[in-house]
Image: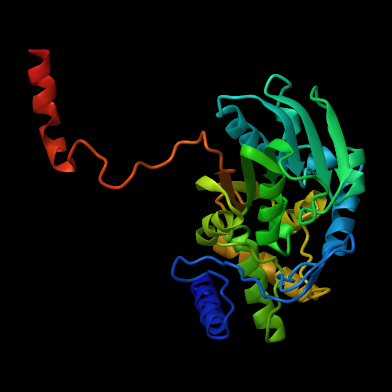
Amino acid sequence: MLKAVQLRWWRRLVLAALRHGAGCGCGGGGRPSGTRGTSSYRSAFGGAASGAVNVFDRVLKRKQKNWAAQQPEPLKYEYLKEEVGSRVADRVYDIARDFPLALDVGCGRGYIAQHLNKEVVGKIFQADIAENALKNSVETEIPTVRVLADEEFLPFKENTFDLVVSSLSLHWVNDLPRAFKQIHYVLKPDGVFIGAMFGGDTLFELRCSLQLAELEREGGFSPHISPFTAVNDLGHLLGRAGFNTLTVDTDEIQVNFPGMFEVMEDLQGMGESNCSWNRKPLLHRETMLAAAAIYQEMYGNEDGSVPATFQIYYMIGWKYHDSQARPAQRGSATVSFGDLGKINNLISHGKK
């Protein structure tokens, strides 16, 4: 009876949240998806782009990443970034060619490069806004140059790199269209960009639990999970940047934790704490305890653990070159689709 009363209570909170525009994704099978506003943007390194989105405090994000890179046991929190980095590297190996010069945008401690070898990549430039991440990056067999740079203001000439990769960094970029254009600019013709970033369903359990607890305890809520790009916008942004032969796919990685506080501890250790300008500086103790209870009740596993879902968008785009395959002209086909139903008869007739 008590559990039924609690569920009805949370259901009322969900409906109230939806009426107030919470978008926490707890009802109807929906999940949260952040949106981005438009304003002027100034880079952490002094550059500015007029009319760019302005959601994240890039200076704070740089401090968070520097702090995480200086921890005595960084490997304890890097399991997710290493896994996604290995999956990006797998996509590099899927391309039957070698890349004399590559760039890793938002490299962190080198989560992609450690899974590559010098037979495929001759030399790699690693760029990141956090100097401590570059100083403590993992050594690899590939000759490496480390550059302190913003993802939106890459300090490289046009047509420089054969390959550009990025893993779990671009979701913190304010002006994502500009970042894609910068990547396209530094790629050589027939060069390829392979990237991964967090998607809109990431941490929907934590987002919903915090919003419901804050709504119930404090009468309103603030965003505690950063907004993410929607998958249906990603291909459009890549196309606008000049990429062609696009491939965008999604995947989900679910990690189990003892409780909500362990989820938040690992996010901090990854350097993935919220850095939105409109973030709330703190939550009351009672609200946090209520959120942990809601998390456990709504999403908890039978063994007492709680899941945290990370949705990953993988993207591949090529810079145009005359040697690339192009679609045939309209009307140039020599076989009608209406004849496809007769193909078995034609094959058997040919064998006779």
Taking the image as shown, residue 130 lies to the left or right of residue 30, namely right
The answer to which quarter of the image holds residue 98 is: top right
Tell which residue pokes out farthest to the top in this image: 352
Viewport quadrant of the C terminus: top left
Q: What x and y, as percent, mark residue 351?
A: 12, 14
Q: Quadrant of residue 37?
A: bottom right
Asked if residue 334 is positioned above or below residue 122 in the image, the reply reads below
| Of 34 and 185, the residue lying toward us | 185
- State the image coordinates of residue 196 (x, y, percent, origin top left): 63, 46
Q: Is residue 251 visible?
A: no
Q: Is residue 148 above or below residue 345?
A: below
Horizontal arrangement in the rendering, residue 212 relative to residue 235 (left or right): right
At horizontal 84% and vertical 41% (from top left) the residue drawn is 74
Q: How is the image coloured?
A: rainbow
| Residue for point 61% across, 55% down | 241
Residue 143 falls in which quadrant of the image?
A: top right
Q: Position of residue 337 (x, y in %)?
A: 18, 42
Q: Is residue 245 left or right of residue 339?
A: right
Task: Report the front residue among 337 and 228.
Answer: 337
Asked if residue 207 lies left or right of residue 348, the reply is: right
Residue 267 image point, x, y percent = 76, 54
Q: What residue is shown at x 79% (from left), y 50% (from top)? A: 154
The one of 184 and 86 positioned closer to us in this rendering = 184
The front one of 161 and 39 is 161
Q: Is residue 227 visible?
A: yes
Numbered marks: total: 0
